[in-house]
Amino acid sequence: MMATNVSGIIDSTNDVDLSIDFAGIKAPNPFWLASAPPTDKAYNVERAFAAGWGGVVWKTLGEDPPAVNVSSRYSALYGRNRQVMGLNNIELITDRSLELNLREIERVKRNWPDRALIISLMVPCVEEAWRTILPLIEATGADGIELNLGCPHGMPERGMGAAVGQNPDLVEQVARWCKQYYSKPVIVKLTPNITDIRAPARAALRGGADAVSLINTINSITSLDLDRMVAHPIVGGRSTHGGYCGEAVKPIALNMVAEIGRDPATQGLPISGIGGISSWRDAAEFIALGAGSVQVCTAAMLHGFRIVEEMKDGLARWMGEHGYARIGDFSGRALANTTDWKYLDMNYVSIAHIDQDKCIQCGRCHIACEDTSHQAIAHYRLDDGTRRYEVKAADCVGCNLCQITCPVEGCIDMVAVETGRPYMNWTQDPRNPHREVQEPAAAM
Ligand SMILES: Cc1cc2nc3c(=O)[nH]c(=O)nc-3n(C[C@H](O)[C@H](O)[C@H](O)COP(=O)(O)O)c2cc1C
């Protein structure tokens, strides 16, 4: 029996059930480790499960002989305090034999029957290769497979990874082979290195895939050694582009998840959200935009397996506070409010408001607005030598730049202005010569 208070809010995190059934794959919570070094062997995966992860996608397996990696392999984009904002890697798929991986997977699944164990796979784009490997995968007892059609370095040169994921016909074909030669759920992992993410998602669905996961890494060069005139990471004296991940890619991943979630052609297709997830809030955002599970790689690589504790606690607490008893209660809830630009209300007006008690008179908002925006923040020097910044309401266009530059959280708010004007989007705007007048309800 769920405890609710008068307003219907669930009182306790005890009443929140984090368990999921993702495309037929069950897990005690939606937090899975993505296919990468944290999931490359039994030693890692068993400690991850002990720490509380709900599932893992085992580091991508391929045909023998195993891949040979280079050193070094990683580079990073740092924030001011050396916080890693983005990680770039040039690793390939597993560098251990297929037989060793399969033996370990079978053992781990037997020891941890309640956790989701998914095997990531990448073999050449020919039917025989899939027909050969899939029975071996099935025999491990793992819960499903994830097709790595997204690795952006090393593997595309061999006709695999992103070379397949960037071609919707091949995506469809490979998904079809997998559904033919494998009986459990098939997840297609998508590459973000493509113009329209909906095309491979639709292709995966046409091929019979049970779900998609995204994103894999984004083509990147993070930085150069300007003395040696070579990019990082440096292998001998040379470098190559790698795959970008970590917090910096979250906005790109969120948008792509939303694109698929909003696409009528892929309605109902389960999505596993990946890309820059490092907190419960990140996870909640992916779920609100339609994800049914989330996968984490960089945050675990930087901070260790125990970050899942905060993720689970934080998500359960937030869900309890908002009256969501299960993940499905809010999965996709934000999609209805995510629309095309042309349906935004052109009559909605908000302007900046500076809380003078919180203002530290640094002047950043003034400089940003004065030099590069709309000259809407007045600057006064008072008799006592202090400064004061005030928004000129008539000139403020509500762009948010001052709020973004302000170093004090909560000092600048965007406040809605009552105009009395009704909702009007661009398709209804009399100034738009191409308008296709629609009722607001239909337009949304
Ligand atoms: C070192 C490294 C190795 C990776 N190896 C694989 C891999 O073998 N297969 C795969 O599908 N994705 C691989 N990825 C991509 C991750 O699974 C994930 O899609 C990506 O890192 C985005 O998530 P994140 O921002 O949480 O790291 C790798 C990522 C990193 C950093």
Image (cartoon, helix red, strand yellow):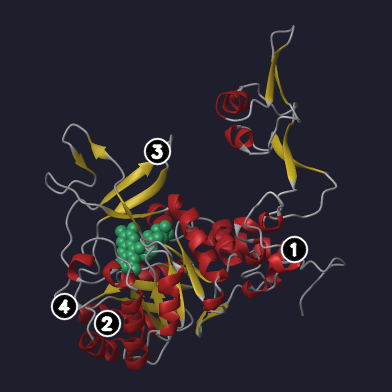
Name the residue carrying label 2: 102
Tell me the kind of residue under disc 3.
Arg
- Marks 1 and 4 sit apart, C-alpha to C-alpha, by 58 Å
Q: Classify residue 125 as left or right of residue 308.
A: left
Residue displayed at 15% across by 49% down: 235
**Which residue in the structure is indicated by mark 4?**
64
The x, y position of residue 189, in whole percent, is: 39, 72
Q: CA distance from mark 4 to mark 2?
A: 12 Å
Q: CA–CA distance between discs 2 and 3?
A: 39 Å
Q: Secondary structure at mark 2?
A: helix
Q: Position of residue 246 (x, y in %)?
A: 41, 53
Ligand 1 near label 3 (Cβ, under 8 Å)? no
Q: Is label 4 in a helix, a strand or a loop?
A: loop
Alpha carbon distance from label 2 to label 1: 55 Å
Q: Which residue is mark 3?
A: 82
Badge 2 density bin: few <14, some 14–19, many ≥20, Cα 10 Å = many
Residue at 85% from the left image edge and 65% from the top image edge: 7
Horizontal and vertical percent position of residue 347: 75, 48
Disc 1 designates what residue? 440
* Tag 1: amino acid: Pro
The disc, 4 or 2, on the residue closer to the chain's N-terminal end is 4
**The residue tagged with tag 3: helix, strand or loop?**
loop
Q: Are marks 4 and 2 in contact (CB under 8 Å)?
A: no
Element at label 1: helix
Task: Check the image and report above or below for 100 versus 372.
Answer: below
Q: Residues within 10 Å of mark 1 (few under 14, many from 20)?
A: some
Q: Residue at x 31, y 45 (%)?
A: 222
